[in-house]
Image (spheres, rainbow, N blue to C red):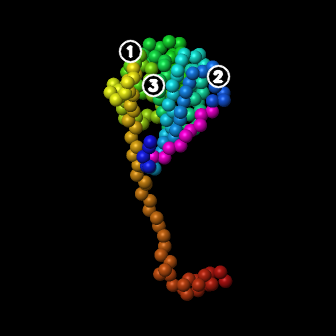
Amino acid sequence: MCKDTVKVKPVLIDTSEWRTPHSLETLSYSFQFEFNKSIIVCVLYRTTHTANDVYNIELLFSQLTLMKKTFYVVGDFNLNLLFPDNYAKKLLAIINKYSLTQLITLPTRGNNLLDLMITNSNVCLNTEVLDPLLYQSDHLLTLCHIPFVREKSKTRTVSFRNYRSIDIELLNQVATDTFR
């Protein structure tokens, strides 16, 4: 589902230390466009309200941060950040703890902000919340425009000597006289 110019690789998230029960579903991939640095996109869906979910989300952020790559965690967190309860407040504290940014600021379902985009990057031109005209959903569509521009290579000056014009006999004579 990606163009040939985009390299896509799955990113394995270690869930062995996640607390159970939990209701998180995740899918993570690394995307690299041409010669740009790769980014990780993790899609997250929180199906029900399980107490361990926020703790496990923190473990997810910790793992992604340790990968030292730009990442975006996007999806339906089912935590309302416009009117935060204790779990949403804990999520906001975790976002702050890892110096992350939550990009979506408008409601995405009714008067609730449930669909989030959390990133460790400042490279997002703008975000949008749109009415999903093409599919039936009670959630609005969230978009983030990330520019991919091939970095210009630095100009290098390469110096060399043209040894083809050297008088080999003279060089041998100088070397012989020098090392006697």
> Residue 16: where, in percent of width, then height?
66, 29
What residue is shown at x 52% (from left), y 21% (from top)?
Answer: 47
Q: Is residue 95 above or below residue 179?
A: above
The correct choice, above or below, for 139 with respect to 119 in the image is: above
User: Which residue bears the numbered disc 3?
Assistant: 116
Determine if the magenta segment contains residue 13: yes
SS at badge 1: loop
Which residue of the protein is positioned furthest toward the front in this rendering? 136
* Residue name at image x 42 percent, y 46 percent: 3
**How busy is the neighbourhood of tag 1: few (under 14 within 10 Å), some, or many (20 plus)?**
few
Disc 2/disc 3 C-alpha distance (Å) = 22 Å
Which tag, 2 or 1, sits closer to the chain's start? 2
Quadrant for the N terminus in the image: top left
Residue tagged by mark 2? 19
Q: Quadrant of the C terminus?
A: bottom right
The residue that disc 1 covers is 111
- The residue closer to the viewer here, 34 or 46, is 46
Tell me the magenta residue range: 6-14
- Name the element at disc 3: strand
Q: Secondary structure at mark 2?
A: loop
Marked residue nearer the N-terminal end (2 or 3): 2
- Can you see residue 105? no
Determine which quarter of the picture holds residue 12. top right
| Mark number displayed over residue 171 | none
Q: Quadrant of residue 82?
A: top left
Q: Is residue 90 magenta?
A: no
- Amino acid marked by disc 2: Arg
Q: From the viewer's side, name the closer residue of 88 and 1.
A: 1
- Per the model, the C-alpha gap separating discs 2 and 1 is 31 Å
Q: What amino acid is at disc 1?
A: Asn
Residue pictured at 49% horizontal, 73% vertical: 161
